[in-house]
Image: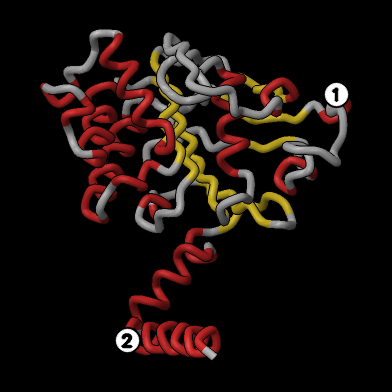
Amino acid sequence: MIIPKHPFIRSVNLKRDKVPSFKRYPFNLPCVTGLTQLELHPAVTFFVGENGSGKSTLLEAIAVKFGFNAEGGSKNFNFSTRETHSELHEHLFLDRGTARATDGYFLRAESFYNVASQVDDLGAGGYGNKSLHEQSHGEAFLALMTNRFQGEGFYLLDEPEAALSPLRQMSVLSYLHRLVYHHSQLIIATHSPILLAYPQAWIYQFTEAGIARVNYTDTEHYQVTKSFLDRHERMTGILLADEERDLKKTER
């Protein structure tokens, strides 16, 4: 894998002495409670974990601290449909490298509609030769990535696979490699075992115990997916049989 020599962000650090209380949100999240310093891979770093584990909260805080809009977009996006982001970014320190990114974007699935509207408002709605709103969710996601991400940039992606078929996820995997080739650094929060397969990337798993680096084949995403595909008939039978028993109990 091609690895940029000079990462834009070397590590994410929590200013623990400035935290008002580790008993309230977001500082009571396990991923924050035990956080001191989180080193980033010069090319691709993944955040994985169950919903509610805090991976998107930390990713959002990094994005806001870097200067991105909390709902997504580039640094010149300043819209806000509602203030929902946490104060975590105020207590982070980003250890910046010697290189400076010439491009960047924060792309998140949950607020993509609002970002697409802002793109139209800014007169940049021609990604894929038509407005993002005139494309399917998956097409618009890919159109934005392939037409807007220029390289030599710092990109943060929050669950980009949400709108994409497995085949499209493979396309994103290829495009990630192109961005890395052009000296980009990415942090990606994902549930996709396809994206997680990117070679030599660092994978941080978020659990109740905090954050820990893991190998690809040790992630729950890989193990559960592989186990299901290898024994899909048996596992489907077990899952549906369990559901039938629960349904019969509720009917009594």
CA neighbours of label 1 inside 10 A, class few (<14), some (14 to 19), many (20+): few
Secondary structure category for the residue under label 1: helix
Residue 97: quadrant of the picture: top right
Does residue 118 lie above or below 160 as drawn?
above
Tell me which residue sits at (33%, 38%) in the image.
Answer: 176
Who's the residue at 39% across and 77% down the image? 228
Residue 10 horizontal side relative to residue 180, left or right: right
- Residue drawn 86% across the image and 28% down it: 20
Disc on the earlier residue, 1 or 2: 1
Q: Secondary structure at mark 2?
A: helix
Specify the farthest residue to the left: 129
Q: Which residue is mark 1?
A: 18
Position in image of residue 194 (x %, y %): 35, 55
Q: Is residue 132 above or below residue 195?
A: above
- Lateral position of residue 124 relative to residue 231, left or right: left
**The furthest residue to the front:** 252
> Camera-side residue: 24 or 212?
24
Q: Measured from the top left, where is residue 119 in percent x and y? A: 30, 16
Q: Nearer the viewer, residue 42 or 102?
A: 102
Q: Are marks 1 and 2 in contact (CB under 8 Å)?
A: no
The quarter of the picture where the N terminus appears is top left
Amino acid bearing label 2: Glu
Task: Please say if 42 is above or below 167.
Answer: above
Q: Which residue is mark 2?
A: 233
Q: Quadrant of residue 239?
A: bottom left
